[in-house]
Image: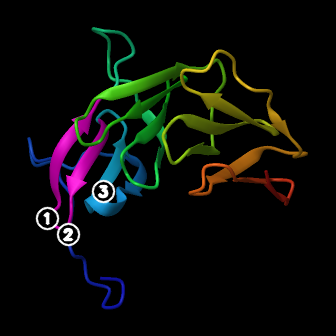
Amino acid sequence: DVKTETELASLADARNGTRPCPYVALSFLGVRASLLTACEGHGLQVWELPAGKMIRALRARRTTDGPITDPRLITVSPDGSRVACVYDDFSIRVWDPDSGAEVRRLDLQINVHHAFALSPDGATLAFGDRHVVRLWRFGGEEAPPPVEGHASEVVSILVLPDGRTLYTGSRDGVVHAW
């Protein structure tokens, strides 16, 4: 409780009672009242709130029998029905947090460090690639041309709930609306 500075819960892996760390990202799954965590060595985890019980693990593998690839960034669609994650193997995967199914995958040759957003319908990803923003529409034939306008690295992206408006922020000190 922020007001009383009292800890309400401490999340621990329900299978073995240990804390899965280090955590690299956290997000709230909206109407589901669940917490999404991204943890090195453990993948993504969905936690029931306020109980603090882990209800699902979403683990991406480098290959079919390979090791788990570590998550780096996460974003959640506004309705909480889709979760997108950037992994250390340069892939972006979209998950259904209710079923635990991987529903889409994009293999990139760039390292997405900061800026990353998912459209409300879960069909389009926007991510920063140096000073430009790239859009990827799953199921589309070609990626549209990059959105250019920043003089420095893009570090934040926001897609409004209308799915048509995109805001980007950069180290150049400018926020653009597209």
Numbered mark located on residue 78 in the image? none
Residue ranking furthest to the bottom = 4
SS at mark 1 in the image? loop
As measured in the structure, the alpha-carbon distance from the residue carrying label 2 to the one carrying label 3 is: 12 Å
First in sequence, mark 1 or 3: give its number: 3
Q: Amino acid at mark 1?
A: Ala
Numbered mark located on residue 35 in the image? 3
Query: Depth check: 157 or 45 in front?
Result: 157
In this picture, residue 148 sits left or right of residue 163: right
Of marks 2 and 3, the one in the foreground: 3
Q: Amino acid at mark 3?
A: Leu
First in sequence, mark 2 or 3: give its number: 2
Disc 1 to disc 3: CB gap under 8 Å: no
Provide the residue designation for mark 1. Answer: 51
Query: Depth check: 82 or 162 in front?
Result: 162
User: Percent position (x, y) of residue 133?
Assistant: 75, 38
* Most common secondary structure along the magenta stretch: strand
SS at mark 2 in the image? loop
- Which residues are drawn in magenta? 43-59
Tell how many labels. 3
